Image (tube, rainbow, N blue to C red):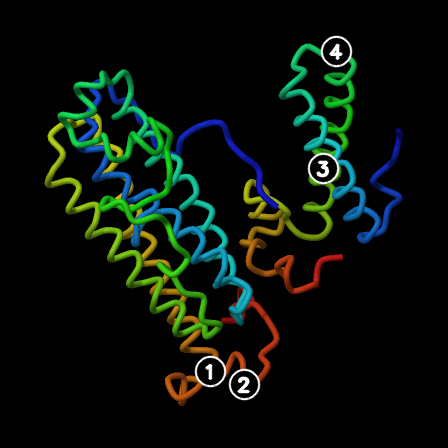
Amino acid sequence: MNYSCNRMSREQLFDWINMVSFAVVETALYLDTHPCDEEAMKFYHEVLEMRKNAIMEYSNHFEPLTLDLAGGNKGKWEWVMSPWPWEGGNC
Amino acid sequence: MWNYEKRLQYPVNIKNPNPKLAQVIISQFGGPDGELAASMRYLSQRYAMPYREVMGVLTDIGTEELAHLEMIGTIVHQLTRNLTPEEIVASGFDKYYVDHTTGIWPQAAGGIPFNACEFQSKGDPITDLVEDLAAEQKARSTYDNILRLVHDNEVADPIRFLREREIVHFQRFGEALRLVQDKLDEKNFYAFNPAFDCNTKPTSVRECGKL
């Protein structure tokens, strides 16, 4: 899988984050009971890197998805300025 | 969506077991003013709030309460480690032990199981935020009650931290209530539920630099 975040629309990037984040969760769950599976570990690091990059990209261009990034890059507390997931405002 | 951090919000390292005290402290796990009720209350109430700042307060405090639930679970666990059957009977822990051994189960100190009726999610922002203010005070009173019974500083120290957080949360909920009262319908906020009746669309109260 190679995918450049830079070419994606907001909606595409958001879907991508959902996809790779699920891959991280699913792989972590598998690794909980198979902690020595090297192939799974390699895949985990791959999808984790994709998730980190995509979340950072999304926060830089649109809105923060985690509290660690909530300050945004515009010097204000972006956390409470954008819609919450249940509003249906996020793509 | 949630992620877990493999750490306690404030450290808990209790060397000496004390099952009698554990039976009292477990009330803050699954009791009427406990951390589970607090978290479920705030995370449930978020959806009906009209302002994103208030949704944020409920989300972030509701999340922190889960961290507090974990601290209380840890305290109860460490207070009930390495018990002999004799100690279990002598401390009165036998009635809990027979059903749960030394597993952690959400109940009040008196044995009443956790129940969602211990909190409300009324769908009226003023009603809910006033409940939240009361909830923080009730939890603070419970921690005060616990602290009177604790003579081990390894237990008292994290309990004091949790007590302090109730006070900070009370402050934040007070500010959240003021945001709602100032913005929603300052002439008529006790008469009906404007967030519901006027079909208020969620917004942020503040635009930085403008208000």
Q: Percent position (x, y) of residue B4?
A: 53, 34
Binning the other alpha carbons within 10 Å of mark 3 as few (below 14), some (14 to 19) or many (20 upward) gives some
For residue B84, above or below residue B131: above
Q: Chain of mark 4?
A: A
- Residue indicated by mark 4: A38
- What mark, if any, has residue B193 been given in the picture? 1
Binning the other alpha carbons within 10 Å of mark 4 as few (below 14), some (14 to 19) or many (20 upward) gives few
- Residue indicated by mark 2: B197
Between the residue at mark 2 and the residue at mark 4, the CA separation in whole angstroms equals 57 Å
- Residue indicated by mark 3: A21
Between the residue at mark 2 and the residue at mark 3, the CA separation in whole angstroms equals 38 Å
Quarter holding residue B122: bottom left
Name the residue type under label 3.
Answer: Ser
User: Quick check: do tags 2 and 4 share a chain?
Assistant: no
Q: Chain of mark 3?
A: A
Of B22 and A23, nearer the camera is B22
Between the residue at mark 4 and the residue at mark 1, the CA separation in whole angstroms equals 57 Å
| Left or right position of B198 against B180 | right
